[in-house]
Amino acid sequence: MTTSTGMTDKHGAHEAQHGPLSYRLLLGIWLGLMALTATTITATRIDLGFLNVVAAMGIASAKAGLVIFFFMHLKYENRLIKGMALTAFVILAIAIGLTFVDVGYRY
Amino acid sequence: MDQTDQTDQTDQTGHPDQTPSTAASGASQPFFGPQNPGATGGKGSGLASWIFSTDHKRIGLLYLGLIGLMFTVALVLGLILRLKLMTPGSTLLTPQQYNAMFTLHGVIMVFMVVIPSIPASFGNIFLPLQIGANDVSFPRLNNFSWWLYVLGMTLAITSIFTGAGAPDTGWTFYVPFSERTTTNVSLAVIAVFILGFSSILTGLNFITTVHRLRTPGMTWKKLPLFVWSLYATGWIQVLATPILGITALLIFAERVLHLGLFDPGLGGDPLLYQHLFWIYSHPAVYIMILPAMGVISEIIPVFARKPIFGYNMIAFSSLAIAFAGSLVWAHHMFTSGMSDTAVLVFSFLTFVVAIPSAIKVFNWLSTLYKGSISLDPPLLFSLGFIFMFSIGGLTGLVLGAAGTDIHVHDTYFVVAHFHYVIFGGTGLGMFAAMHYWFPKVFGRMYDHGRAAWAFWLILLGMNVLYFPMFIMGLQGMPRRYYDYLPQYAPLQMLSTWGSWLLAVGLGLMFWNLYRGCRFGPRATQNPWGGATLEWTLPTPLPHEAFHHDPEAPEPYDYKGINPDG
Ligand code: HEM
Ligand SMILES: [Cu+2]
């Protein structure tokens, strides 16, 4: 238990160094997310063929990126944490990619 | 990585006023096992002090108890299945009961026994101690993950007795059957979902603990290999298990809302389900085996009195297995109708992942070479592990080669393969761990002669039980069949006899451990002469292990360390 309390304290100190994010920044990101949502909806109304999927996925990824980096503070974490978060996405990309080795080559 | 982590070390020194001589505390009350006469204090022994405990040692034992219970339940189910299959024809069970029973056997064994087995029990107890920490990073989360396990377990058992009958899909929950069967699949997949969360939290806790709580001087190259293996396992748990969770939820959604994700009738793709399921469940087999490999890497050098051969390669191969193991899942789908390109790619990748597994086996054997070997029970079980895992692993390659797999897929050959690796591998690894750490945890020693007898009975029983399945599989006996052609009758009979031998061996082993726990002689501090940190602590373990950050030892240097038992 001593150890965990120690951890929390340290973490608290660590957060304080950066201070909370300013309302202006948070509001800007929120507006950005809203704009991207609007773009997603608009994009579905135009027929881009296969690119419709690419567009939807691309915009969704951009939104997720904003949430993770700012709302979830990843931008202000050290390289270890960033690396860990990145690993998860790399593995996800590989999993999806390898699935397409099947789906993309079926007759 | 090293520098950042070392500077992140937190101060673990709870009581600076204690004697500085050893890292261990002599005065405080043991957390379990025989108590020092006249000693007072401690955390009490009431039920609540256990089930709400945030002490990693108690949580480890809570897990161990429930895992043992679930193991016994699923074992009995397995014995009944074998009894049914002893003779052809319709005996003992109805086909529906048979289907439900092998499903439950699989679900309980996989999700409630083998996945949590070593990490949740011995990992919880010894991972912090081996790196010189007094607990895991998130003790309360640790307790919470045990409660999730209890909840998942309860729901899974409820699913047997409620609704329109026990699930009958097999542990793989393959669509479209799992969407259409009227049995209680919905509740079972929710249980799997919850059990998955328990596993994720354990993995997360271990990763964080290894990064943040190592005692100063414990560099990555000084980590005991058991810790390395749990670290690699933790990553698989955190990265792969969410996919199982979402897949289980999707099955639930399909059944309730008929979304049409997997149902071809509604425009879905049943192979998508198989992909999702195996993206988790193949990595899951490494969640099962890696911790056992870690245990073996601890035990072999101690009983050969020789530093482990190829420390770097063993540590690295754990990570390599964790990574490469997540790229091979579709080898379970060679006959499913996926594209030939995928068959080729996944067959190749499967052969790649065999390399790091083989590296470990060769390193263990090289460690034994010219060692000063004492054949104590933990080593016996470890040698059994190497033997059984080698057979299981090599037959895995038969299955990984697409050409041969077409012949033996979904036959007894596969059943034999995975019982060799899981029961012969993880199972024996768990038993090895039990015999190795028993004196440290319970403070007493079991009877060595009886343990050896139990080991030989178990080894013989396993082989008589599962080896005939290789032969039957090659001859074409499909798995999960209620009945069979007369040509298989002799080997089916032999296999059932094997199951009885195995049951006797397991009974003897558990009885011996129970006797040891109750009446065995008091164990000494370091009965095997291990060099890792847990052996510097008193027996049985005190509530608070380290009052000062201990010095990081060379984990496999036995100079000057002798067994004191
Ligand atoms: C050298 C490593 C291994 C290789 C190359 C390998 C390969 C394979 C392949 C290709 C299959 C699919 C067979 C089929 O359905 O036709 C399979 C099935 C299986 N393997 Fe392995 N395996 C290996 C190690 C392991 C380990 C270590 C475990 C568990 C601890 C394991 C557990 C299983 C299970 C449970 C199945 C059956 C799943 C099911 O259909 O119910 N394997 N293995
Ligand atoms: Cu596999």
Image (cartoon, coloured by chain):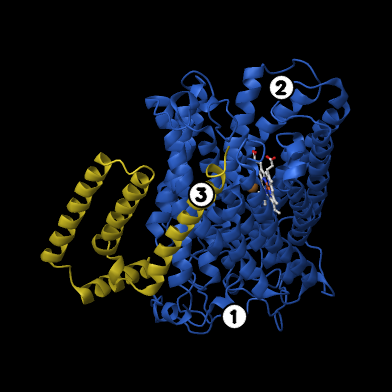
Of B340 and A79, nearer the camera is B340
Q: Residue furthest left?
A: A24
Q: Secondary structure at mark 3?
A: helix
Q: Which chain is blue?
A: B
Q: How would you rate the neighbour count of disc 3 (Cα within 10 Å): few for under 14, some for 14-19, many for 20 or more?
A: some
Q: Are marks 1 and 3 in contact (CB under 8 Å)?
A: no
Q: Mark 1 or mark 3: name the one nearer the start of the chain.
A: 3
Q: Residue at x 54, y 76 (%)?
A: B220
The chain holding disc 3 is B
- Disc 1 residue type (three-letter): Pro
Between B68 and B384, the one nearer to me in the picture = B384
Give the Cα separation between the discs numbered 1 and 2: 55 Å
Give the percent coordinates (x, y) of residue B75: 67, 36
| B99 with respect to B53 (left or right) | right
Whether labels 2 and 3 share one chain = yes
Q: In the rendering, which numbered label is found on residue B553?
A: 1
User: In the figure, B117 relative to B88: above or below?
Assistant: below
Mark 1, other Cα within 10 Å: few <14 / some 14–19 / many ≥20? some
Pointer 2 residue: B482
In this rendered view, identify the residue nearer to me: B101 or A78. A78
Q: Which chain is yellow?
A: A
